[in-house]
């Protein structure tokens, strides 16, 4: 019996960086481990845990301190100050948590830590534990950042074309924003590059992707590290359906307007709705928000648009009232249920990695409107490698104009290119499900990880 204390095969502590896009995949990986008989304690910061809406989940949650217990990064003087203090206070409080778990009879065998928090490996090694780094971004993005870390890719970029092993030729604008817009967020730049500072000491390198999706780059990186793909980390009931009750992520930083969204979608016909979301963090320029609002209006399609509270003031005046016949604007939605609703025919997305994996796994064609960090690289792959969507062109100010938004939405919904994309969509949906299903590439990798943990 898995729920008896001593019957667990091993105990993993899973440490997530405190944002929605990092907690979701690590929580889902935790559920997969638990399903295979491993005890899991998910750990995040005290400050973010206070804002989390918990839905049903069996995973135990513990917290450590980032040194800003009353507000997290929002409370810090700067991003750099936040990350430095998190490093120091996080290491101490993580050590204390390990001691507490040990003295309460639940010693930890392995720390699975977010690649953004490389100091957790030092803590794991101090306690003699197995250390597994977990990358929440695509392997393509990780590979680009690794080449920056090695000094092979020199910054600022000077060549018109970037050629790296395992990757298609890239233009500067296809690289992560911290690279092509070098100097834009120096503290985040340091963080994503320092992910590789001690990776050679990690016992495992786990990546939230699946082999079939990123075969070439995975093959290349797996020659350097003990790399295993374990994704897509999407609740099982949307994929292989082997983990009963696993139908939501479970920890939500914003409260979703579930009833409003689902009731509204239920009244729409198949494939008639454009779903628009920029994830949990991106802040759009006011002008970009207005252009999109106009583009949606001009497309004359139904739309469900997630506009977080902090973004609401950027909407054109009276937009919500004036478009209420065609659109629904909410502050947060249950994205998995929305993307799998048959009414949704197109996803206008910032191409955050989780949203990208979700759309690929459910076969929803995308209009890519990347904003920052890894999103441009994901957009490049969506359009040119996986052929699952179109990247909306930007003008000289970097903005997607209303005409382009309208055109690309229509192209996906009823154009020739849309038909081709919908065909590919079926292929990716099948491959994503197979990867996590019994005997699939990710399932076998998780099985191997657990088996070695048990015998170490
Ligand atoms: N999400 C959600 N409701 C929303 C918008 C997003 O549940 O209204 C979820 C989405 O399913 C995804 C995560 O939030 O799992 C966003 O992660 P992503 O990597 O796409 O973007 P980020 O928020 O990190 O920029």
Image (cartoon, rainbow, N blue to C red):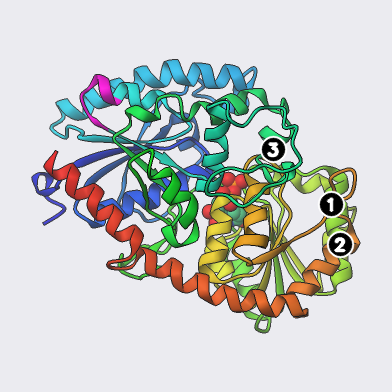
* Residue 127 forms part of the magenta stretch: yes
Instruction: Report the magenta residues as a range.
Output: 124-130
Residue 91, horizontal then vertical, whole percent: 37, 20
Residue 18, horizontal then vertical, whole percent: 49, 36
Q: Secondary structure at mark 3?
A: helix
The residue closer to the viewer here, 406 or 89, is: 406
Does residue 19 appear in this view?
Answer: yes
Residue depicted at x 37% and y 53%: 230
Residue depicted at x 44% and y 46%: 220
Query: Which residue is labeled 2 in the image?
Result: 404
* Residues packed near mark 3 inside 10 Å, few (<14), some (14 to 19) or many (20 plus): many
Instruction: Choose the circle earlier in sequence order: 1 or 3.
Output: 3
In the rendered image, which quarter is residue 293 located in? Answer: bottom right
Residue 247, horizontal then vertical, whole percent: 41, 64
Mark 2 and mark 3 in contact? Answer it, CB < 8 Å. Answer: no
Query: Which residue is labeled 3 in the image?
Result: 177
Locate residue 274 relative to residue 88 in the image: left or right: right
Instruction: Choose the circle earlier in sequence order: 2 or 3.
Output: 3
Q: Is residue 199 above or below residue 163?
A: above
């Amino acid at each position: 019996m898995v729920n008896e204390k001593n019957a667990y095969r091993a105990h993993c502590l899973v440490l997530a960086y405190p944002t929605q896009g990092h907690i979701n995949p690590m929580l889902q990986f935790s559920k997969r481990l638990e399903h295979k008989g491993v005890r899991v304690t998910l750990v995040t910061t005290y400050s973010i845990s206070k804002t989390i809406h918990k839905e049903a989940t069996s995973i135990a949650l513990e917290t450590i301190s980032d040194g800003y217990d009353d507000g997290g990064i929002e409370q810090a003087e700067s991003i750099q100050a936040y990350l430095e203090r998190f490093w120091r206070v996080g290491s101490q409080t993580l050590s204390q948590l390990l001691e507490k778990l040990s003295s309460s009879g639940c010693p930890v065998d392995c720390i699975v830590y977010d690649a953004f928090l490389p100091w957790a490996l030092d803590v794991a090694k101090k306690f003699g534990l197995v250390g597994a780094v977990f990358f929440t971004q695509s392997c393509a993005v990780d590979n680009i950042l690794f080449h920056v870390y090695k000094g092979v890719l020199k910054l600022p970029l000077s060549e018109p074309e970037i050629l790296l092993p395992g990757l298609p030729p890239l233009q500067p604008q296809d690289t992560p924003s911290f690279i092509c817009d070098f100097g834009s967020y120096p503290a985040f730049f340091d963080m994503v590059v320092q992910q590789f500072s001690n990776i050679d000491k990690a016992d495992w390198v786990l990546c939230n992707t699946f082999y079939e999706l990123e075969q070439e780059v995975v093959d290349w990186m797996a020659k350097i590290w003990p790399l295993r793909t374990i994704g897509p980390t999407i609740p099982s009931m949307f994929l292989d359906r082997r983990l009963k009750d696993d139908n939501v992520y479970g920890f939500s930083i914003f409260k979703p307007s579930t009833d409003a969204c689902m009731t509204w979608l239920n009244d729409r016909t198949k494939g008639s709705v454009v779903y628009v979301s920029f994830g949990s963090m991106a802040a759009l320029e006011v002008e970009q928000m207005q252009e999109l609002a106009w583009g949606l209006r001009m497309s004359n399609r139904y739309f469900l648009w997630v506009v977080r509270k902090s973004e609401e003031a950027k909407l054109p005046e009276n937009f919500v009232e004036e478009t209420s016949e065609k659109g629904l604007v909410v502050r947060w939605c249950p994205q998995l249920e929305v993307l799998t609703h048959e009414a949704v025919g197109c996803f206008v997305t910032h191409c955050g990695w989780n949203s990208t994996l979700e759309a690929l796994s459910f076969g929803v064609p995308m209009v890519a409107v990347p904003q920052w960090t890894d999103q441009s690289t994901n957009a490049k792959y969506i359009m040119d490698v996986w052929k699952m969507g179109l990247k909306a062109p930007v003008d000289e100010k970097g903005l997607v104009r209303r005409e382009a938004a309208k055109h690309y939405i229509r192209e996906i919904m009823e154009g020739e290119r849309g038909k081709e994309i919908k065909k590919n969509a079926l292929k990716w949906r099948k491959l994503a499900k197979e990867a996590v299903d019994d005997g699939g590439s990710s399932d076998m990798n998780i099985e191997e990880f657990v088996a070695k943990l048990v015998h170490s």
